[in-house]
Image (cartoon, rainbow, N blue to C red):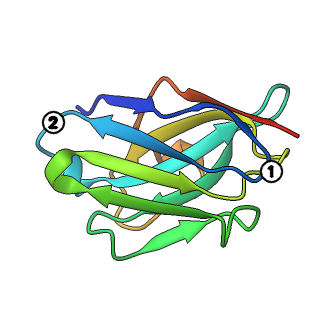
Amino acid sequence: QVQLVESGGGLVQAGDSLRLSCAGSGRAFSRYVMGWFRQAPGKERDFVSGINWSGGSTSYADSVKGRFTISRDNAKNTVYLQMNSLKPGDPAVYYCAASATVSIAEHGRHYDYWGQGTQVTVSS
């Protein structure tokens, strides 16, 4: 079993940057595909980015390509989401999740473990 704890959210201005972290427990952390999702009030939870076990393969939603970067440090059991050029459309609760699939999945149903989420707010 994997437990995930996100951190790094907060209130920033449009154009600013934030780095989210997701710390995982368990020695099997490096075996999991990791993903970031976000959910705004009244909207469905959407895929933001994913990374395979080695970090050699990544995937991004079109809305964040070129602005967000996902990475992981398996020695620290941590996955990161660097968010640059934040826009008014980015505010949401951001969740990290772990998937036992081989390749990066973009639907939440493929993820087995979820963190509690961290709030990102962007003021214009």
Residue 46 at x, y percent in the picture: 69, 46
Closer to the observer: label 2 or label 1?
1
Looking at the image, can residue 105 be seen? no
Q: Quadrant of the C terminus?
A: top right
Mark 2: amino acid: Gly
Amino acid type, residue under disc 1 in the picture: Lys
Crowdedness of circle 1 by 10 Å Cα count: few (<14), some, many (20+)?
A: many
Indicate whether 82 appears above or below 103: above
**Is 69 rendered above or below residue 76?**
below
Q: What is the spatial separation of the Cα atoms under label 2 and label 1, in whole angstroms?
A: 35 Å
State the mark number for residue 74. none
Circle 2 SS class: loop
- Dividing the picture into quadrants, the one containing residue 40 is top right
Q: Quadrant of residue 73?
A: bottom left
Would you say residue 96 is visible in this rendering? yes
Is residue 110 toward the left or the right of residue 41 in the image?
left
Mark on residue 26?
A: 2
Q: Position of residue 70 (x, y in %)?
A: 47, 60
**60 lies above or below 42:** below
Q: Of helix, strand and loop, which one carries label 1?
A: loop
Location of mark 1 (residue): 87
Determine the residue positioned at 41% across, 68% down: 103
Is 43 displayed left or right of 3 in the figure?
Answer: right
